[in-house]
Image (cartoon, coloured by chain):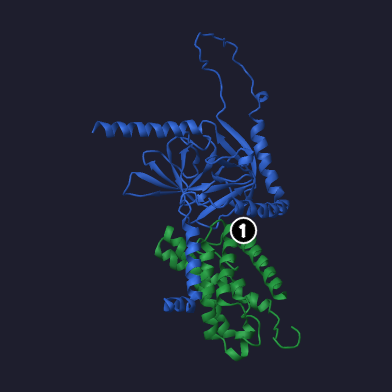
Chain colours: A blue, B green
Amino acid sequence: MRNVILFIGRYLTFFTFLFLQIVSLWFLYSFNQFHQARFSQTANELTGAVNKRYKNFENFFLQGEENRRLHRVNDSLLNLLSQQVATTDTSSRLVTDTLLIDSTRQYRRYFFRPASVVFNSTSSEKNYIQLDRGSLHGITENMSVLNADGSAVGIVVHVSPHFAQVMSLLHVRQKVNVSLQQTGDFGTLEWDGKDPGLLLLKGLPKSVPVKMGDPVVASKYSYNFPPGYPVGTIAEIIIDKSTNFYLLKVKPAARFNNLQYVFVVENLQYAEQTTLDQETRKKIEDAKRSSR
Amino acid sequence: MREIIRNLIRLLLFLFIEVFVLHKMPHLHRFISPSLYFLFLLWLPFSVSPRFLLWIGLATGLVIDYFLQSPGLHASACLWLCFLRPFLIGVLAPRESSEFNYREPSPQSLLWAPYLIYVTILTLVHHTWLTFLEWLSFGSFGDFLIKVFASTAISLLMIIPIELLFPRSLRFRTNVGG
């Protein structure tokens, strides 16, 4: 026993090293792999406060670029005003039917909240973005994030009271359902962690005509992103003879290096859609199991 | 006391450069990710005991980690660096002249050639471990090797001019004042 204590005492530095190494590796791997943005909320709040100060300073130098972008958005919004549209059709008439559910009633599907970016990176293989809005402002996980000009940026993966962490499109685990604007055929947008200027579009069958420069937009089948918002343009077409699918490289529409003001978009039907999806799978699986 | 304040200011400066300059600037290349903060650990005084050095390494790594949002990654690499540092100094430093006359490792205290070996080995260790941990979850072996050497090279390319531009004042540890 005495020898054991002597042994440990002699190599105490080595054992300290071993112990601390295990602690740090535990830090690294104890987190949910998919949501690696999850870590202690206190640390999130602290680094968020520092990042916010830095951002305030940095914003001073970047206002010109932001002004131009806002101007573009205003421009496109002005075109949507009802004053710009004249009604020429006078033959329409109102038909009243006795159905209880009014099929012409509109309901709101997406809710936009503005936020500003306080931390951003593009140099890693797993890039996260930090926003200055958190659960106190109504942000929750799985909301999508659009740039000031409407281009897709990422998905919220974790929130603390005042800040939210966003998994950028430049993240090797990110998968977004997108479609071609012209034909509406959908595929999956991924990133291989190599060039932050090029994303990968997979799963688009070769029967679909694709040209260089074709716009790619958020798909109608995405639970997170509102459909039709720009994601990027086709920059390179790689034809792999061994499969029936294209491998397309997409130039992202958002410039990830200078994100400043973004919109956090909530799909108000998200919970209903995902619950229905899960329950359906469960129902079918259970039916299969009991029939055996 | 002055020593502690000096090192704290150094840590804050390196933290600022790492998080808000090196990590913010446009991506150079997918293999090249420059890093400088570990110079703080290389510059710590000789008088820090090896065990305390490990704790400082863990703290430094975790602070960087929480800013770069990868808890444990840099801390683990820093621990390797801090564990190997005393051995390297033991091998490279002529005992009588440096450890007793100078406060901390520098080109002046260790002489240029041994100091460069010291910096190169520890930088290589730091980047190897960092890239290794990243590679475990993602990437190919060729990428891993190239990334280690490219990152080490770019870091050394920054460290050597820093040493030339900011020579740290040689403080002799004598009985009179200091």
Q: Nearer the viewer, residue B115 or A92?
A: B115
- In terms of depth relative to the viewer, which is nearer, A113 or A253? A113
Q: Is A203 located above or below residue B55 in the figure?
A: above
Q: Whole-percent x and y of residue B58?
A: 56, 66
Q: Is residue B26 left or right of residue A100?
A: right
Q: Nearer the viewer, residue B131 or A279?
A: A279
Which residue is rendered at x = 62% and y = 90% of the image? B97
Kindly identify the residue that appears in the image at 69 percent across and 79 percent down. B168
Query: Quarter holding the C terminus of chain A?
Result: top left
Q: Which residue is the site of mark 1?
A: B24
Residue B165 is at least partly visible in this image:
yes
Q: Residue at x 50, y 73 (%)?
A: B124
Q: Is residue A179 left or right of residue A287?
A: right
Considering every residue shown, the one lying at the far left of the view is: A292
Image x and y of residue A169, in percent = 52, 48
Picture layout, residue A176 above or below residue B61:
above
- Please state the horizontal and vertical placement of residue A92, each as a whole percent of the image: 57, 11
Would you place residue B54 above or below residue B139 in this image? below
In the rendered image, residue A28, in percent from the top left (x then y), is placed at 49, 58
